[in-house]
Amino acid sequence: MKTAQFTNTGKTKLTGKQQSMIIERLKDPTAPNSEIIKRAGYNAKSITAQSQQYIQNMKIPEIQNRLEPVVDEIEEALITTVRRYKDSEKLPEVIEAMNNARWIHDKVKGKATQRIEQRSERLIISIDLTGSDSE
């Protein structure tokens, strides 16, 4: 188990919940983002809101720096989640997979674009991993 040191290394002062998120992620690098947010004490009710909160926090350089020791494990867990849920019939699972794919892509290549279509009773998600902003 990795431990976190909470001396501020940057100019960003982290909240208690942000620090808790770091601790929870370091304790369990493979847990879903939504689960880490719940454990950290955030009040986001849906998986989508929890994932969005996690992504928002991960944009903070101080958090990125503190999670650097486990970033490979985190990314592998996200890839596994995407593969597991990409064809799910349950909308929250598909959204979790989409948010994870977007986060991975943004970290590696830059901003991802997405297009969501509804056809009959299935949700089809298309994620452009080329990194081009043609819209």
Image (cartoon, rainbow, N blue to C red):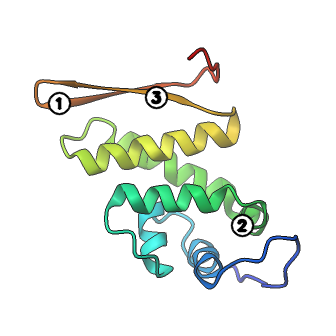
Label 3 sits on residue: 114
Upstream in the sequence, badge 1 or badge 2? Answer: 2
In this image, 28 relative to 59: left or right? left
- Which quadrant does the C terminus fall into? top right
Upstream in the sequence, badge 3 or badge 2? Answer: 2
Residue 117 position by quadrant: top left
- Among all residues in the image, which is located at the extreme left? 120
Q: Position of residue 33 (x, y in %)?
A: 48, 61
Q: Position of residue 25 (x, y in %)?
A: 58, 71
- Is residue 118 visible to the viewer in this orientation of the structure? yes
Report, in whole angstroms, how far the alpha carbon at label 1 lies from the one at label 3.
17 Å
- Is residue 32 visible to the viewer in this orientation of the structure? no
Q: Amino acid at mark 1?
A: Arg
Residue pictured at 69% horizontal, 79% vertical:
2
- Which quadrant does the N terminus fall into? bottom right
Residue pictured at 51% horizontal, 79% vertical:
40
> Regarding mark 2 in the picture, which secondary structure is present there?
helix
Label 1 sits on residue: 122
Front-lying residue, 93 or 17: 17
Label pair 1/3, CB-CB below 8 angstroms: no
Label 2 sits on residue: 63
In this image, 114 relative to 129: left or right? left
Residue pictured at 61% horizontal, 20% vertical:
130
Report, in whole angstroms, how far the alpha carbon at label 3 lies from the one at label 2.
26 Å
> Regarding mark 3 in the picture, which secondary structure is present there?
strand
